[in-house]
Amino acid sequence: MEKRGVLYLGKAKSVYETDDPDRLILEFRDDTSAFDGKKVEQLDRKGMVNNRFNAFIMEHLKEAGIPTHFERLRSETECEVKRLTMIPVECVVRNLSAGGLCRRLGVEEGLTLDPPTFELFLKNDEKGDPMINESLAETFGWATRQQLQLAHELTLRVNDVLRQLFLEGDMLLVDYKLEFGLFHGEITLGDEFSPDGCRLWDAQTREKMDKDRFRQGLGEVIEAYEEVGRRLGVRFD
Ligand code: C5P
């Protein structure tokens, strides 16, 4: 497959067109951003680590029957994916309280959320990704009821699969964000799954092993990402 021009430059990934109208190439860069792009740094090895980690998780989800856009690894920092028409909505599931939930509701960090919560946010940097609901998404045409229902079901199935996977590596899946799109009309998981877009804590010490290390200036960000991968058997060399 031949790589063509840039289709979209995200904060941490670049998306390229290819000679196949149904396929794109995702490039994971070392750029790391937080607080709507207000804090940006280059973290050595991050592109490679997230590319390999994402491939591992996407393959695992595929085996569990979740339709994903992931096709194959292409290089150290690139993978090939199906070209989706993205739904501009972020689906967030939380198993433990942290981050935005604590800020919004004033609850303490680390409460067990049973059942896990499910939230929708509009993907819109300018507006700071405001929280929305099914009614708003339907009325403004961001997604249909049926698409939202399917995205909801898939997001919770991903929770069952990944919570178990991380627990086997002695980690707690605190929360995560997923994005979906349509491939020839079929709801399909897009974007990425990496420690950039989820929270993971050591199950014993509750030490943070995700992008909160960057957001909160805790240091050893990529070392923590690599440790997450190592515990799951992902190879980075
Ligand atoms: O900030 P908040 O607590 O709402 O984030 C919930 C989860 O979704 C976190 O794991 C965070 O990393 C992820 N997220 C993301 N991209 C966003 C918003 C949230 O990856 N734009």
Image (cartoon, helix red, strand yellow):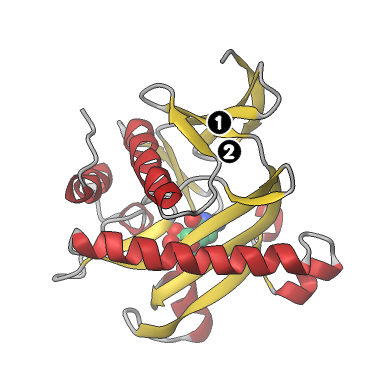
According to the picture, the residue beneath numbered tag 1 turns out to be: 14
Q: In the shown orientation, is residue 42 left or right of residue 80?
A: left
| Residue drawn at 39 percent across, 68 percent down | 160
- Residues tagged 2 and 1 counted as in contact (Cβ below 8 A): yes
| Residue drawn at 19 percent across, 48 percent down | 227
Residue 82 sits in quarter: top right
| Dot 2 amino acid type | Gly
| Residue drawn at 53 percent across, 80 percent down | 104
Q: Secondary structure at mark 2?
A: loop
| Mark 1 vs ligand 1: CB below 8 Å | no
Q: Locate residue 10, reporting x and y percent.
A: 58, 38
Q: In the shown orientation, is residue 45 left or right of residue 61?
A: left
**Gap in angstroms between the C-alphas marked 2 and 1:** 6 Å
Furthest-left residue in this view = 204
According to the picture, the residue beneath numbered tag 2 turns out to be: 10
| Dot 1 amino acid type | Ser
Please, is residue 98 above or below residue 57 in the view? below
> Label 1 neighbourhood size at 10 Å, few (<14), some (14-19), many (20+)?
some
Furthest-top residue in this view = 2
